[in-house]
Image (spheres, rainbow, N blue to C red):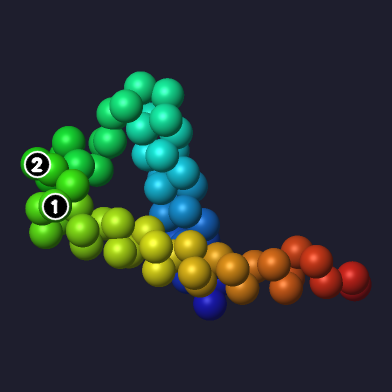
Amino acid sequence: MKALHVIALILVILGGLNWLSVGLFEYDVVSETFGGATEVGSKIVYIIVGVASIWALSFFGKVTRND
């Protein structure tokens, strides 16, 4: 389970860095890599990062818990 949390965190960070490059430089690394935002490869990456972000929502319980 810990490995899944690490993978989700890495994917969320990479997705955030991609959005940072879009915001600052108007350069979408994912769409450039796969030939456009509507290409199947780009959509798969976007979906995987989105699912990882949903999974990362479960981290709030761990972060906010008082031990």
Say which of 16 and 6 sits in front: 16
Q: Circle 1: is it few (<14), some (14-19), or many (20+) Cα within 10 Å? A: few
Which label was assigned to residue 38? 1
Residue 27 location, quadrant: top left
Query: What secondary structure is found at the residue carrying circle 2?
Result: loop
| Distance CA(mark 1)–CA(mark 2) | 8 Å
Eyeballing the image, is 7 above or below 29? Answer: below
Q: Position of residue 12 (x, y in %)?
A: 47, 53
Please identify the residue farthest to the right as the structure is shown.
67
Q: Is 2 left or right of 38, judged from the image as shown? A: right
Location of mark 2 (residue)? 35
Q: Residue at x 59, y 68 (%)?
A: 57
Q: Position of residue 3 (x, y in %)?
A: 49, 68
Q: How many marks?
A: 2
Eyeballing the image, is 54 above or below 29? Answer: below
Q: Circle 2: is it few (<14), some (14-19), or many (20+) Cα within 10 Å? A: few
Query: What secondary structure is found at the residue carrying circle 1?
Result: loop
The residue under label 1 is which amino acid type?
Thr
